[in-house]
Image (spheres, grey):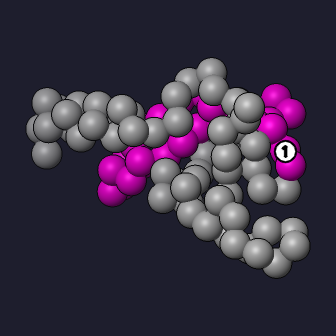
Amino acid sequence: MTGDEIRRVFNSIAAMAPQPGEQWVHYRGITVTVKGIALREADLTPLVLYEHDEVVWARTLAEWGMEVLGTDGKPVRRFRRAE
């Protein structure tokens, strides 16, 4: 892929991903702040960069929006936008 193609892919992903500065709540109740979107160099997998307790974490965009079993055993989104 050329640099221009990578930028087009990144821009299309970033438009539908969580935005920097947004607050999101993990299904276990932890509030995190989105720092940005990145691409994993090896395979260009989109990543969400987020911060909690002064540590920056990365999770794939697919995992970010995935349903998981909540603490009550029922399916919930891994993250939801904070109100």
Left or right: 67, with 56 as reference point: left
Q: Answer yes or no: is residue 24 visible.
A: yes
The question of residue 47 being in magenta is answered with yes
Quadrant location of the C terminus in the rendered image:
top right
The question of residue 54 being in magenta is answered with yes
Quadrant location of the N terminus in the rendered image:
top left
Q: Which residue is mark 1?
A: 30
Residue 13, percent across and down? 34, 40
Q: Answer yes or no: is residue 51 visible.
A: no
Q: Please rate how many residues cluster around mark 1, counting C-alpha atoms within 10 Å: few if below 14, some from 14 to 19, many from 20.
A: few
Label 1 element class: loop
Which residue lies most toward the top here? 21
Main secondary structure found in the magenta portion: strand
Q: Residue at x 36, y 32 (%)?
A: 15
Q: Residue at x 65, y 59 (%)?
A: 77
Identify whether 77 is placed above or below 4. below
Residue 49 occupies which quadrant of the picture? top right
Q: Residue at x 49, y 51 (%)?
A: 61
Identify whether 77 is placed above or below 25. below
Residue 6, percent across and down? 21, 38
The amino acid beneath tag 1 is Ile
**Residues shaded magenta:** 29-56
